[in-house]
Image: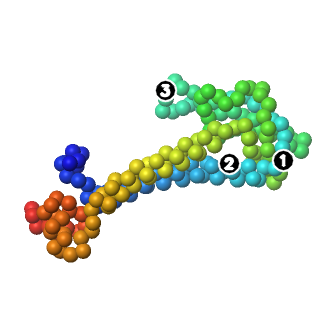
């Protein structure tokens, strides 16, 4: 018997509710990860002009949830068609992924030189995959109880089957009026 549910097994309805809740949270994480990854891959496709940039400085950002912990976002300087540009990374990390003065390859979008893709900068790539992976794991974690419960129980087709399941303690949880009548 399952102690977590007061000595009884989880019903189909309960398993479905658990799955819906975990699926919503999982899909939120997967969406955030997908947006980050899609943005990176679209920038990679759009940015066709190669130049060399330099890490100008590391922008300090407060980590928020961790007190007295600072993260660093590299700020890159590069030149395109004789004009100087800077690009500040969207995601900060600790330790910093680059050192000030380090040379990097910068791929520039010819239509908009402020849009760049930096192949050596993989922090956003990791961030996207980790969020998408956590989301997928949460969805699967919610799906497992549902699969177990649905394989264990069969939806009754007749009232007699519903009564037999209820009497044996294996009620499916599907619209059972017997619970109401038994109170």
What crowding class fits label 2: few (fewer than 14 Cα within 10 Å), some (14-19), or many (20 or more)? some
Q: Earlier in the sequence, mark 3 or mark 2?
A: 2
Q: Earlier in the sequence, mark 1 or mark 3?
A: 1
Q: Provide the residue designation for mark 2.
A: 40
The local secondary structure at tag 3 comes to loop
Q: Is residue 100 visible?
A: yes
Q: Where is 123 relative to 46, above or below?
A: above
Query: Residue 160, located in which quarter of the rendered image?
Result: bottom left
- The residues tagged by marks 1 and 2 sit, at their Cα atoms, a distance apart of 16 Å
- The structure residue drawn at horizontal position 18% and vertical position 48%, both measured from the top left corner, is 7
Q: Provide the residue designation for mark 3.
A: 67
Q: Where is 75 relative to 175, above or below?
A: above
Name the outermost residue toward the bottom: 158
Q: How many marks?
A: 3
- The residues tagged by marks 3 and 2 sit, at their Cα atoms, a distance apart of 30 Å
The percent position of residue 44, horizontal first and vertical second, equals 74, 49
What crowding class fits label 1: few (fewer than 14 Cα within 10 Å), some (14-19), or many (20 or more)? some
Q: Nearer the viewer, mark 3 or mark 2?
A: 2
């Amino acid at each position: 018997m399952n102690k977590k549910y007061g000595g009884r097994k989880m019903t189909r309805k309960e398993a479905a509710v658990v799955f819906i809740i975990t699926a919503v949270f999982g899909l939120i994480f997967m969406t955030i990860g997908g947006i980050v990854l899609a943005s990176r891959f679209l920038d990679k496709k759009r940015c066709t002009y190669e130049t060399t940039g330099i890490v100008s400085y590391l922008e300090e950002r407060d980590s928020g949830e961790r007190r007295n912990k600072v993260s660093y976002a590299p700020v890159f300087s590069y030149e395109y068609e004789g004009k100087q540009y800077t690009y500040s990374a969207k995601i900060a990390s600790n330790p910093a992924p680059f050192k000030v003065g380090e040379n990097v390859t910068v791929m520039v979008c010819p239509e908009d030189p402020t849009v760049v893709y930096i192949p050596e900068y993989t922090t956003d790539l990791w961030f996207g995959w980790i969020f998408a992976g956590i989301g997928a794991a949460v969805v699967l974690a919610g799906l497992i109880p549902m699969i177990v419960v649905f394989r264990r129980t069969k939806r009754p087709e007749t009232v007699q089957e519903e009564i037999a399941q209820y009497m044996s303690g294996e009620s499916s949880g599907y619209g059972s009026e017997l619970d109401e009548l038994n109170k």
